[in-house]
Image (spheres, helix red, strand yellow):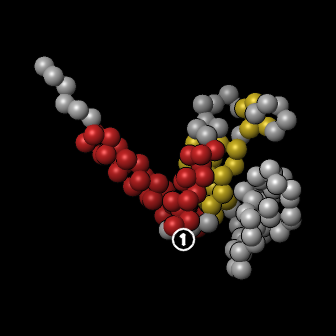
C-alpha cells in the first residue's frame, strides 16, 4: 500500500497515511495531483461513517474533482469520536472545486430522495 501524496509505502492492513491523512492505494498513479502549498481545503459534506465518506469521494472523482475523507475518529482509542457530534467525518475538496462538488452531492441526494419516494408503497386507508 502506498500514499498517493507522499508516496510512502505501508504494510498491508494500514488504510490511511498517518502523515497526509488520506486513503492509501495499491499502486502509485502515473499522474499525481498535488495541491499548491497555499491551497485551502474546504468541507463539502459531513458524513456518518467512512463508507459514506468514501462513496461521496468516489462520486466527486467521477466528476474530475479530487477530494479526501477525514475521519473524526482517534486511532488507538477504540475509534472513540473526538467531537460530540453525530457525524463521524467530513469530505474535503480544494476551495476552487467546492461549489461544483456541493452541486454534485446535492444532485445525488435529491435523486436518492426521489427514488425513495417512488419506492414507498402507498398507504392503505
Q: How crowded is the residue under tag 1: few (<14 C-alpha within 10 Å), some, or many (20+)?
A: few
Q: Residue at x 69, y 62 (%)?
A: 40
Q: Residue 33: horizontal and vertical position, in percent?
A: 69, 74
Q: Residue 121: horizontal and vertical position, in percent?
A: 23, 32
Q: Nearer the viewer, residue 72 or 119?
A: 119
Q: Residue at x 63, y 44 (%)?
A: 50
Q: Quadrant of residue 47?
A: top right
Q: Secondary structure at mark 1?
A: loop
Screen quadrant of the C terminus: top left
Q: Residue 119: horizontal and vertical position, in percent?
A: 27, 40
Tell me the residue that label 1 is attached to: 64
- Residue 99 visible in the picture: no
Q: Residue at x 74, y 70 (%)?
A: 27
Q: Is residue 120 left or right of residue 80?
A: left
Q: Residue at x 56, y 65 (%)?
A: 61
Q: Residue 30: horizontal and vertical position, in percent?
A: 71, 80
Farthest front residue? 12
Amino acid at each position: 500500500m502506498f500514499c498517493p501524496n507522499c508516496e510512502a509505502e505501508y504494510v498491508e492492513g494500514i488504510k490511511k497515511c498517518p502523515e497526509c491523512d488520506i486513503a492509501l492505494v495499491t499502486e502509485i498513479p502515473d499522474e499525481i495531483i498535488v495541491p499548491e502549498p497555499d491551497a485551502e481545503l474546504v468541507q463539502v459534506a459531513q458524513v456518518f461513517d467512512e463508507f459514506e465518506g468514501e462513496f461521496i469521494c468516489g462520486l466527486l472523482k467521477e466528476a474530475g474533482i479530487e477530494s479526501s475523507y477525514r475521519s473524526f475518529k482517534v486511532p488507538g482509542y477504540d475509534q472513540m469520536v473526538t467531537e460530540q457530534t453525530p457525524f463521524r467525518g467530513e469530505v474535503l475538496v480544494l476551495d476552487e472545486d467546492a461549489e461544483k462538488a456541493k452541486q454534485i452531492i446535492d444532485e445525488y441526494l435529491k435523486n436518492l430522495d426521489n427514488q425513495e419516494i417512488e419506492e414507498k408503497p402507498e398507504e392503505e386507508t
